[in-house]
Image (tube, grey):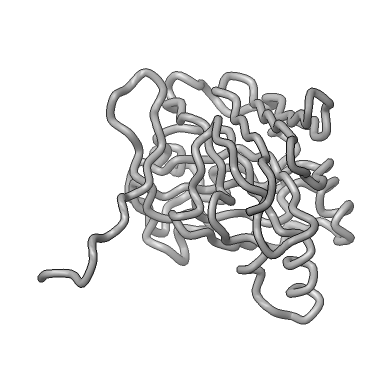
Amino acid sequence: MQTLFDPPAWPSVPVVGETAAFPVRRIFCVGRNYEAHAREMGFAADRDAPFYFTKTPTAICPSGATIAYPPGTANCHYETELVVAIGGAAFRIAEEEAFGAVLGYACGFDMTRRDLQGAARDQGRPWDLGKDFEQAAVIAPITRAAAFGPLADQRIVLTQNGEVRQDARLGEMIWTVPELIAHLSRFYHLQPGDLIYTGTPAGVGPIAPGDRLVGAIDGLTPVELTIGPAE
């Protein structure tokens, strides 16, 4: 069927050492998956069940970009995260089979308009304005799972203008990657192209024009972002 206008290009993420890119289908994000971060946000961490919010694929922003300070906010924060790239179908999958659905991993930033998120949360409203906006899902090239090796206690760190702001270990996640995939697959038919941002450690904070952010996880390509002036 003919469309009224040309559809936008499908966002994609480079894969280390490959010419073919990873087309982004959906973006799932895990909330409060590190106990220290939950505390700094004023909440007690628990293991009752993970919870999620989503970002649209148009939120994808490539590592190395310079972006304008996001509109509509006076308090935008960085959050550095391990991102899981799904490469196989998964529906009601068991935890012990979950790694079979993983194509690879990447470093990412879940950019957050914290003032808008907080206002929505206080009113019992969805977080969309605080979390889902253009260039809010920054991501580095994906490393294949086989090249990365087993997920263990790799260091995750973020620097802001060369100063360390976040410094933790992946082993501190409340919900592991297999647990997250198994849980999500109870509610969604996970498919190749889905991304899971697995939550951020403590130490989140505000950005300002001129800032340079670098997020790193042992064994993965770092993610980098420069903040320009507001539009």
- In this rendering, position of residue 6 left or right of residue 149: left
Residue at the (59%, 37%) spot, across then down: 66
Residue 79 percent location from the top left of the image: 71, 44
Residue 222 percent location from the top left of the image: 60, 25
- In this rendering, position of residue 133 left or right of residue 174: left
Query: Which of the 4 image quadrants contains residue 53?
Result: bottom right
Image quarter where the C terminus lies is: bottom right
Residue 63 percent location from the top left of the image: 54, 33
* Nearer to us in this view, 190 or 221: 221
* Nearer to us in this view, 210 or 80: 210
Residue 98 percent location from the top left of the image: 45, 43
Q: Is residue 102 above or below residue 10?
A: above
Residue at the (82%, 45%) spot, across then down: 205
Residue at the (46%, 63%) spot, across then down: 186
In the picture as drawn, the residue positioned furthest to the left comes out as 1
- In this rendering, position of residue 82 left or right of residue 48: left
* Nearer to us in this view, 132 or 168: 132
Q: Is residue 191 above or below residue 165?
A: below
Q: Is residue 176 above or below residue 3?
A: above
Image quarter where the N terminus lies is: bottom left
Residue at the (43%, 55%) spot, across then down: 26
Q: Is residue 29 above or below residue 140?
A: below
* Nearer to us in this view, 86 or 138: 138
Numbered marks: total: 0
